[in-house]
Image (tube, rainbow, N blue to C red):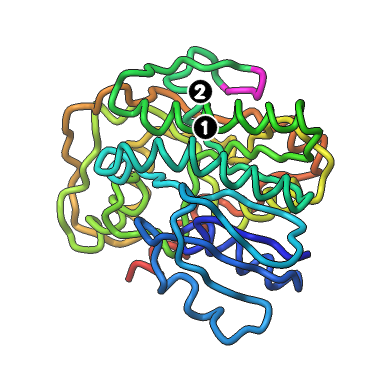
Amino acid sequence: MRILVTGGAGFLGSHLCDHLIKKRHKVIVMDNLLTGDMKNIQHLFGNGNFKFVKHDVTNFIHVSGKLDAVLHFASPASPIDYLEHPIPTLKVGALGTHKALGLAKEKKAIFMLASTSEVYGDPLVNPQPESYWGNVNPVGPRGVYDEAKRFAEAMTMAYHRYHKMPVRIVRIFNTYGPRMRRHDGRAVPEFISQALANKPVTVFGKGTQTRSFCYVSDLIEGIYRLLLSNCNEPVNIGNPNEITLNHLAKQIIKLTGSRSKIVYKPLPVDDPKVRRPNIARAGKLLKWKPRVSLETGLKDTIEYFR
């Protein structure tokens, strides 16, 4: 296939490009580098099946020739990024999704939306199935990301129903691995960076809030299987192994051999108390489940950060 990946210079987008190239597809990356990094994809330059275009997808998108799929992964994705860039986050979720959908419609291509577990907000149901509508504060500081993705899902389904377009919606849960930025505000890179420097490991709240961490290779395999499926409904992709942030911090300190101590800071506004995917749909439709253990994935990620 010939595939456009918006946001392909980002953490997830670049790993997705690697996987697609490995599967012998032709890949065009479109990224404005607001939070993406050329270092993530520079190893692909010189590959005849790879092309990079610097462009902001909130503006009109033109790609000559045929396209078989448009994978819309462009968006700030960490709390630090979307709190620093609230309006671009909303615009890429709304205008960017609209432009990418329009391109997919023109090319008669499959459209895939990288959505997020944040559409569930601070959930009142645990684990979260795709049928859960969520508990989101639309006017809180996190609303710029949560509502951008919820709107993007609504628009994607509208194009599917009205234009009969084939669409894929992947709800991505907490993912970690090489190429994450050191200080992007997410727990794994933050804890690893602090532990390797023997600095205090910062945990928000009491550290009893839970997350479920999926290693990036597992996530990308799930996304690829979804792309090749015929499922037009949202699908959770993530690891259902739920742990507290205290547990994560202690494990990272242990695995790095760090002298760091845990320090506690006030919980950010609307920070979810629990986060765990129900992956029954992915198991049934895609025959997918995560395989990399937390310890194995953390060791690989720590090595990258060293």
The residue positioned farthest toward the bottom in the image shown: 46
* Circle 2: element type: helix
Q: Which residue is mark 2?
A: 120
Residue at 60% across / 54% down in the picture?
292
Q: Are marks 1 and 2 in contact (CB under 8 Å)?
A: yes
Could you say where residue 284 lies in the image, as x and y percent from the top left? 82, 35
Could you say where residue 63 lies in the image, as x and y percent from the top left? 63, 63
> Main structural element of the magenta stretch: helix, strand or loop?
loop
- Location of residue 56 (image quadrant): bottom left
Q: Which residues are magenta?
A: 127-131
Residue 145 among magenta residues: no
The answer to whether residue 305 is left or right of residue 105 is left
The numbered dot on residue 117 is 1
* Circle 1: element type: helix
The answer to whether residue 260 is left or right of residue 135 is left
Residue at 76% across / 34% down in the picture?
232
Q: Is residue 131 above or below residue 291?
A: above
- Location of residue 265 (image quadrant): top left
Give the number of marks. 2
Q: Is residue 141 above or below residue 231?
A: above
**Amino acid type assigned to the residue bearing label 1 in the image:** Ser
> Which residue is nearer to you in this view: 154 or 178?
154
Q: Is residue 98 above or below residue 268?
A: below
